[in-house]
Amino acid sequence: MKIIAASAHQKAAEGQNIIELPNDADPLALDLTGVTRIDLHFPKFSDGRAFSQARLLRQRCKFTGEIRATGDVLIDQLVQMARCGFDVAVLREGVDLADAQRQFDRFSAFYQGDALQPQPHFARPA
């Protein structure tokens, strides 16, 4: 997962096909033709609806473009975001990028399947 600072995040520019999806919108109702990036918003860290949206986009809609987490993104959420299908996380102001990257060093593998690796650990080839 790519992690960027809030100051480096750029909203959709002219000619880009980017959707900024509110966290109460149904991702299954989207026309994803030509869409290269979807920004899912976390209005506050305790609102996890964007996790479900990302999972739906990856698994049911088979969206292969970039899914970006914006808003109140905390370090503690990054690993779960990656497992749900997010490619990029925009950290909120004041969060250190190096501290955020260390989260991924702490957790190298998971027993359960997820959006990145659908098969559970026991069912994967040796």
Image: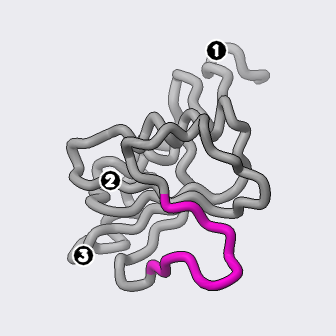
The coloring applied to the image is one colour
What amino acid is found at the position of numbered circle 2 in the picture?
Phe
Q: Which residue is mark 3?
A: 93
Where does the image place residue 109, in percent across and percent down from the top left?
Answer: 53, 36
What amino acid is found at the position of numbered circle 1 in the picture?
Phe
Q: Which mark is residue 75?
A: none
Where does the image place residue 110, in percent across and percent down from the top left?
Answer: 51, 30
Chain part drawn in magenta: 9-20
> Which residue is at the front of the view, 104 or 116?
116
Q: Secondary structure at mark 3?
A: loop
**Where 61 sits versus 13, above or below?**
above
Which one is in front in this view, the residue at disc 3 or the one at disc 1?
3
| Magenta span includes 7 | no
Q: Residue at x 58, y 25 (%)?
A: 113
Q: Which residue is mark 2?
A: 42
Q: Which mark is residue 122?
A: 1
Where does the image place residue 26, in percent across and percent down from the top left?
Answer: 50, 37
Horizontal side of 33 relative to 110 (left or right) equals right
**In 3D space, how far apart are the residues under numbered discs 3 and 2 (Cα atoms)?**
14 Å
